Image (spheres, helix red, strand yellow):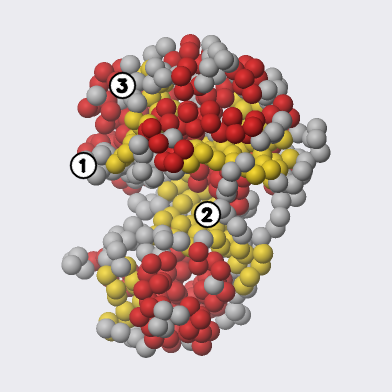
Amino acid sequence: MSGRTMAAAAPDSPLYLGFDFSTQQLKVVAIDGNLNVVHQDNVQFDSELPEFRTQGGVHIHTDRLTVTSPVLMWVKALDLLLDKMKGAGLDLSRVRALSGSGQQHGSVFWRTGASETLKQLHPDQDLHQLLQDSFSVADCPVWMDSSSRQQCEELQAAAGGAVVLAHITGSRAYERFTGNQIAKLHQSRADEYQNSERISLVSSFAASLFLGGYAAIDYSDGSGMNLLDIRTRTWSEICLEACAPDLERRLGTPQPSTSVLGSVSSYFVHRYGFSESCSVVAFTGDNPASLAGMRLQPGDIAVSLGTSDTLFLWVQQPRPALEGHVFCNPVEQREFMALLCFKNGSLTRERIRNENTGGSWELFSAALRETPLGNNGNIGFYFDSMEITPPAVGVHRFDREDNRVSCLGPGAEVRALVEGQFVSRRLHAERLGYSIIPGTRVLATGGASCNKEILQVLSDVFNAPVYTMDLSGSACLGSAYRALHGLVAESGVSFFDVVKKAPEPKLVATPHPTAQQVYQQMLQRYARLEESILQEPRP
């Protein structure tokens, strides 16, 4: 979608911008004070900035483990996007506040002297020309990079093991996490590390462009680095020391995700007509921004049903584990969000559909309608590819006596798959500290969320009503909501008061009266069988 102006806002009403620096594109959405989307636009990296020669917004290196993106591509994309917005007639002087999100775990290394350059940007030139010598690393490691295995092992050893590290930082050591990427840079390219006066995440780098000075890393995106103590909201000394020398100075002091970091720099005032009083609210990661865009509330769980299934949870008392991630909550400073990813999602559902119902979703849905809750005791684990949570592979079926069986009837197979997937999602969510409370809602999105029978099983397993919502631009929209909230957060106004006018999600399923009894028992049994599968030697 390019340069669409939607509902006409009153000509002088205030606007709020949300940017999303994602892997493949830079997007923006503008909302008015009533939360109506009045404009949206984007820049596609591969097609609109072909000179950077990216595929899917990244460079995959010959070792297949190293994956980077050129930092100047992101800068040039912002030049292009702001030109498009101005060309579409959007009056940027009406923008009261802006915020944004960035793909999580990407890092940007500012060269010594870059802060002076940022302060003195000349409005006659494009940002990418002004900043072309401001980065000590031209190609930044991004979330797809998995080349820091050794540094992960060193960090876990320094912290006293993976469990201790997860307790401190919310996650065990992951290759893509920024602390491990910084350690790798320091070990393999010490000169470039020494020549970096500041290290940003993609989110705080983008905020720095608007501020004309270094933006703080916010608590929520900062908790995806293996460096932040998620309970004290400060950098962990143990983790900093394990990664690189003099790191704290290079990272700056983390700030609450609702902070107003300052006003937009004079460059944007003179070049694009922004108001001098336009506030820059802390940028955050794309997953936390999506939580804001979905308007998740305490006790809610969002389930994205796609190629992989992702769960977002609002958690009050986290229990970080060796699987999944716990981040600081982006809209409520004292709370947390957890994230779980399951690799075997839609493709596995499609395989079972093809093998058991002749490729028909109608017959697949009928099989779910016609089989009883609990599937007469039949239970299945379907890991077509190596699963993340739990780390297991293969198809494992059990009858009601826990005996292994090689196949089930077509109807039982379909229900075993869908029940098994959702029981697994709930089991692992509860292990991270999630619990179903009165008023809990399940918000479903992604490809399979249009199938009513699949959503009925989801509602039954979680014993909670299921709602659907369109999530295509949730990180962008969440950033615009956060810009609006940032202006009033200091005075104690809650995020939910600010977004209460937003359209409500649609109720599509409520749990069957017997669901709680059936699935409470199945959860315990599933956990026991999963453990037995994990004990087996891998094929």
| Residue identifier under label 1 | 63
> Within 10 Å of the Cα at label 3, are there few (<14), some (14-19), or many (20+) other Cα atoms?
many
Say whether disc 3 or disc 1 marks the residue closer to the N-terminus: 1
Residue ID for mark 3: 193
Earlier in the chain: of badge 3 and badge 2, it is 3
Q: Is residue 39 left or right of residue 162?
A: right
**Residue type marked 2:** Leu
Give the foreground label among 3 and 1.
1
Asked whether the residues under the numbered discs 3 and 2 touch, taking CB atoms below 8 Å apart as contact, a structural biologist would say no
Residue drawn where x is 46% and y is 23% of the image: 128
- The residue closer to the viewer here, 506 or 64, is 64
Say the numbered circle drawn on residue 313: 2
Of the two numbered discs 2 and 1 on the same chain, state the one appearing first in sequence.
1
Q: CA distance from mark 2 to mark 1?
A: 35 Å
Q: At 42% across and 27% down in the image, what residue appears? A: 72
Q: Position of residue 47 (x, y in %)?
A: 44, 41
Look at the image and tell me whether residue 471 can be seen. Answer: yes
Query: On the image, which quarter does residue 308 sit in?
Result: bottom left
Q: Is residue 220 visible?
A: no
Q: Is residue 364 left or right of residue 3?
A: left
- Name the front one of labels 2 and 1: 1
Q: Which mark is residue 181?
A: none
Mark 2, other Cα within 10 Å: few <14 / some 14–19 / many ≥20 = many
Label 3 secondary element: helix
Amino acid at the residue labelled 1: Asp
Q: Quadrant of residue 142?
A: top left
Relative placement, left or right, of 436 versus 183 is right
Q: Residue at x 32, y 81 (%)?
A: 398
Apparent side of residue 307 relative to residue 468 in the rendered image (left or right):
left
Q: Secondary structure at mark 2?
A: strand
